[in-house]
Image (cartoon, rainbow, N blue to C red):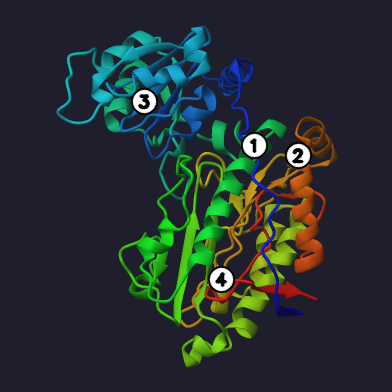
Amino acid sequence: MAELLRIDWPEFGMPEVPAEPDLAEYRGRLAALRAAVAARGLDVAVVYGDREHSANLHWVTGFDPRFEEALLVVTPGSALLLAGNECLPYTGISPLVAAGDIAVGHCASFSLPSQPRGTKRVADWIAEAVPAGAAVGAIGWKWFGADEAEAPEAALDLPAFIADPLRAVAGRVENAADLMMHPVHGLRARVDAGEIARLEFANQMAAIALSRMVFAFREGMSDFAAFEAARVGGLPLGCHPTFACGERAAQGLSGPTGQVLRRGSAISFNICHWRSNICRAGWLANDEADLPEAAQDYLAAFAFPYMEAMSLWCSLMRPGVTGGEVWSAMQAALPFDTFGVFLNPGHLIGVDEWMSSPIFEGSGMALASGMAMQCDVIPGHPVYGSTRMEDGYVLADEVLRADLTARFPAVAERIAGRQAFMRETIGLDVPDSLLPLADTCGVIAPWLFNPRQLIVLR
């Protein structure tokens, strides 16, 4: 049974800045990519990145393009990173570039319009780097199914000015984005203890910023002022900041626009860094009396059942449970006619906010240790608005938990404290395998003008 209880939000402290992967780890990633490409029967991998879609390129190299596009060409014996005018110096952030494992080429066509050109053309670079007649795996940021394209393997998510020269040189070019992103066999779909420490840092930075914002909410303040109160620390953003209230309440992807916080308005908002997205939704209210009359049973009809469903979701986050089981359980707990949950109830997260998901209708994919999982169950209703408990977690078996404790004891201690808070204070069914990465995990405050009133289960 759910109820409201006055509780202080937990504070387990800010992690120390974690170390980024070193040269040895990046060399291992590059070797893993070469091995996966060869196992697919391909000769060459071409990894594309731009400002919005840089996660695959960043995972392999430690470099992400800014303002521009970039392309990594990997053969069995060489690797070439092509960058534009402004990104060329920045490629040195990659340990593999600094060590000489990856060569760098200047391709001004990746630069912004009207900037100086005069360098080798994209087609010329590709003709030099890709052996004639080679089988090429093109890695952008999504792959396609048979219900989307006549020949999914040939459907590329690269710009035509790259795809066309590739097809002119290669024997065949196929979409190989799944080699990096697929929830079962994708190279990025599992994390180790070092990456858990990075995930926790990003999630906790976002959670603390979101907490500052929530506790600054005041009737009559602008959404600009509310977002400013978050004091976002400066980590790269994983998506546009959202803050939807007032006239924009139903437009969940809206950012601050100058709306004024009004009592009785629905609201949703987030802080999203690379590796994290902390999001909440509820009402700008002190209690149910502030809501529109039709929505005043929001707690019993909408928010309380959602919290009970989130406890069920947590209980299912165990290695071996199939994604289809999770999907079916969420559909049963949150009937679509009332809750309208349309997207996958949970997905993998990395530098990109949404990598892929093993959770969908009929999925036989098993949840596995090392999955960085976003609790992203998004309800919506024309009267009740929404509610949310969106935070980051990692699924970890005993071996991974032991490695985390040995290598990063402070991280493991904070995670254990969050597990205890979620179980003992909030009443959620949290298995040992579910590692909460932020202090907001388990926190649902339905009344955002009264944020210490939290939903608990008894």
Choose between 339 and 324: the one closer to the eye. Answer: 339
Amino acid type of the residue that numbered disc 3 sits on in the rendered structure: Ala
Q: CA distance from mark 3 to mark 2?
A: 37 Å
Circle 1 or circle 3, nearest the eye: 1
Choose between 325 and 146: the one closer to the eye. Answer: 325
- The local secondary structure at tag 4 comes to loop
Mark 1 highlights which residue?
16
Image coordinates for residue 81, horizontal then vertical, percent: 40, 17
Residue 131 occupies quadrant: top left
Mark 3 highlights which residue?
70
Q: Earlier in the sequence, mark 1 or mark 3?
A: 1
| Image quadrant occupied by the C terminus | bottom right
- The local secondary structure at tag 3 comes to strand
Lateral position of residue 408 relative to residue 94, left or right: right
Q: Earlier in the sequence, mark 3 or mark 4?
A: 3
Up-down relation of residue 390 to residue 200 (above or below): below
Is residue 234 visible from the viewing direction of this image?
Answer: yes
Lateral position of residue 426 relative to residue 50, left or right: right
Outermost residue, bottom side: 293
Q: Dot 4 surroundings within 10 Å: few (below 14), some, or many (20 or more)?
A: many
Mark 2 highlights which residue?
410
Lateral position of residue 199 relative to residue 255, left or right: right
Image coordinates for residue 337, horizontal then vertical, percent: 55, 78
Circle 4 or circle 1, nearest the eye: 1
Q: CA distance from mark 4 to mark 1?
A: 31 Å
Choose between 350 and 333: the one closer to the eye. Answer: 350
Residue 329 occupies quadrant: bottom right
Circle 4 or circle 2, nearest the eye: 2
Amino acid type of the residue that numbered disc 2 sits on in the rendered structure: Ala
Q: What label does residue 387 carry, if any?
A: 4
